[in-house]
Image (cartoon, grey):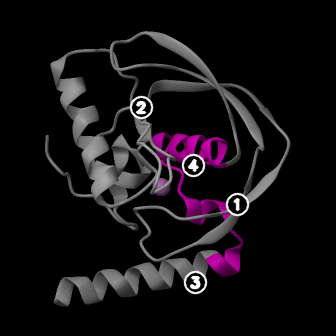
Amino acid sequence: MAIRTILRYPDKRLRVKAETVTKFDDALKTLVDDMAETMYAAPGVGLAAPQIGVPLRLFVIDIAGEDEPSELKVFINPEFVSKEGELAWEEGCLSFPGIHEEIERAERVVVKAQDVNGKPFTLEATELLSIAVQHEFDHLDGTLMIDRVSLLKKRFIDREMRRAQGSHARA
Ligand code: NI
């Protein structure tokens, strides 16, 4: 297992539309292990493959709290079966460190996906899990949290992120 580098906005690789996973092999298992390790190390509640520069349709989520046992969920080739209601939640993203914005999404989703062995499953999600699934799914289409806020906030986030990258490059 290895911790991979998480790409930060405005890296263009975050904008790629990811491809369907077709091979459920050892390389995929290693990728999933690396993504989980990278997410836990960050730490974060979710990580999509495009965030580490791998343009494939998969993400990992673990919404367990600090005092709870970890509960890793792996979603490969996910699709929404249904979305209902509305819920505003203050979101963050490992590709936007330090940025938190309220975003409105569906309250309840049903998602179908495959596990690391290719076995299909269906999951109903509410609250934080619902938000996390919708947030990570966006990454597979190159959609980022900055695309879901007002124009004013968009400009603010863009400026903050570019400033942070600049100071990072000089350090
Ligand atoms: Ni994100």
> Which dot marks residue 157?
none
Residue that carries the numbered disc 3 in the rendered image:
156
Q: CA distance from mark 2 to mark 3?
A: 29 Å
Q: Nearer the viewer, mark 4 or mark 3?
A: 4
Q: Residue at x 38, y 12 (%)?
A: 118
Q: Position of residue 153 (x, y in %)?
A: 65, 78
Q: Which residues are magenta?
A: 128-153
Q: Position of residue 28 (x, y in %)?
A: 24, 25
What amino acid is at disc 4? His
Q: CA distance from mark 1 to mark 2?
A: 24 Å
User: Nearer the N terminus, badge 4 or badge 2?
Assistant: 2
> Does the segment drawn in magenta span residue 57?
no
Q: Residue at x 46, y 54 (%)?
A: 67
Q: Nearer the viewer, mark 4 or mark 2?
A: 4
Residue that carries the numbered disc 4 in the rendered image:
135
**Cβ of disc 2 within 8 Å of ligand 1?**
no
| Of residues 38 and 104, the one drawn nearer to the viewer in this rendering | 38
User: Within 10 angstroms of label 1, few (less than 14), some, or many (20 or more) residues?
Assistant: some
Residue that carries the numbered disc 1 in the rendered image:
89
